[in-house]
Image (cartoon, grey):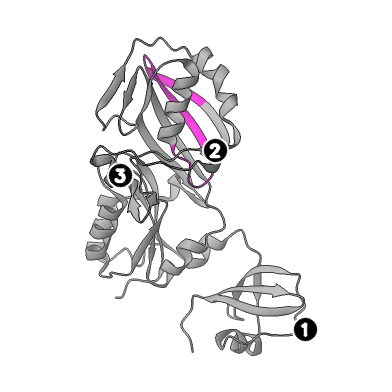
Amino acid sequence: MPMPNGILLVDKPSGWTSFDVLAKLRGALGTRKLGHSGTLDPMATGVLAVFIGKATAAADRQLDHDKTYEATVRFGLRTDTGDITGTPLQTADAAVTAAQLQAVLPQFLGEQQQLPPMYSAVKINGQPLYKAARKGQTIERTPRPITVYGLELLGSPAPNDFVLRAACSKGTYIRVLAEDIGTALGVPATLAALRRTKAGVFDLADCHTLPDILAAAESGALAENGWILPIETVFAPLPALQVNDGVKAHLMNGCPTSHYAAADGKYRVYDKNGIFLGLAVVAGRVLQVEKLFCERE
């Protein structure tokens, strides 16, 4: 049975790159047409949305790119990578208290500029920064706009280790945030653990471990057990529009439909049988297809 188009939510294991996960799944799912959104560092775990087949075209069209993380910040240590997998650059005696940490967190909320770390996949002049970093080079970088919506202290599992819940915009580097919080407290800091609990509309509670996914794929149950979410899941925030056969034919052929009685905006479009067709836009009472995700008839 061919693997259906859709979205598979993986709880990425530590020590795997996002590419490693895709490589493993290509063999298990029997398809090379896989993509993902929101790369996670090898050390990080949590929500990794894998897009299968026609759904790969939806990855870059997501409406909600915000993320939520649970991050363990370790004070008293700074590394070259910004996390504990790197080489120590600075150590110091630190006696950070919860009260001290709570006092500085508000200054990191809201819109701000963040400098991408050298150990990142950001490309400058066509080369990922991490390749230069591995050669000991430092490249001039431009700060990028980010937004931190919330920072909540969840606890302290060990002295000088504090767990924060961070809700932020796409492109936010939690490693850099951890280091900046340390700077505000006057001590070196690095990221000791990172778990993504939410990515756009996707939640950790709906994710499955890689071993469970591989076992389900081997048994043939993966296509039937409901783990592969419909493509339109990623477009859930959009209003739905159901069209008749005539309008459907226009959409399938890329033709506009004039005098369409719907408010201006973008829609999830379904046919009269409730089958998801794709995305369409209404502007000035004209309905125009944006992207089809169904098979053309």
Q: Earlier in the sequence, mark 1 or mark 3?
A: 3
Seen from the viewer's position, the closer of residues 274 and 286 is 286
Q: Which of marks 3 and 2 is nearer the N terminus?
A: 2
User: In the structure shown, which secondary structural element does the residue marked by tag 3 occupy?
Assistant: helix
Disc sitting over residue 108 in the figure: none
Give the extent of the magenta segment. Answer: 153-173
Asked if the stretch drawn in magenta spans residue 105, the answer is no
Query: Distance of mark 3 from mark 2, alpha carbons?
Result: 20 Å
Q: In which quarter of the image is the N terminus?
A: bottom left
Amino acid carrying mark 1 in the image: His
Residue, disc 1: 259
Could you say whether the residue bearing mark 1 is in a helix, strand or loop?
loop
* Distance Cα–Cα, label 1 vs label 3: 53 Å
Q: For numbered disc 2, what is the local secondary structure?
A: strand
Image coordinates of residue 130 in percent, x first then y, are: 30, 44
Residue under the image location 50 percent in, 34 percent down: 166
- The picture quadrant where one finds residue 93 is top left
**Residue marked by disc 2:** 113
Residue at image mark 3? 130
Query: Residue sitting at 55 percent across and 42 percent down?
Result: 146
Picture layout, residue 39 above or below residue 181? below
Q: Which residue is drawn at 28% across and 51% down?
A: 210
Q: Is residue 185 found left or right of 27 in the rendered image?
A: right
Query: How far across and down, in percent of the image, does residue 85 sit?
Result: 26, 33
Q: Is residue 13 visible?
A: no
Task: Determine which quarter of the picture holds residue 226.
Answer: bottom left
Few, some or many residues within 10 Å of mark 1 (<14, 14–19, 20+) = few
- Per the model, the C-alpha gap separating discs 2 and 1 is 45 Å
- On the image, the x and y values in percent for residue 253 come to 56, 89
Q: How crowded is mark 3: few (under 14 residues within 10 Å), some or many (20 or more)?
A: many
Q: Residue at coordinates 48% horizontally, 43% vertically from top-left? A: 142
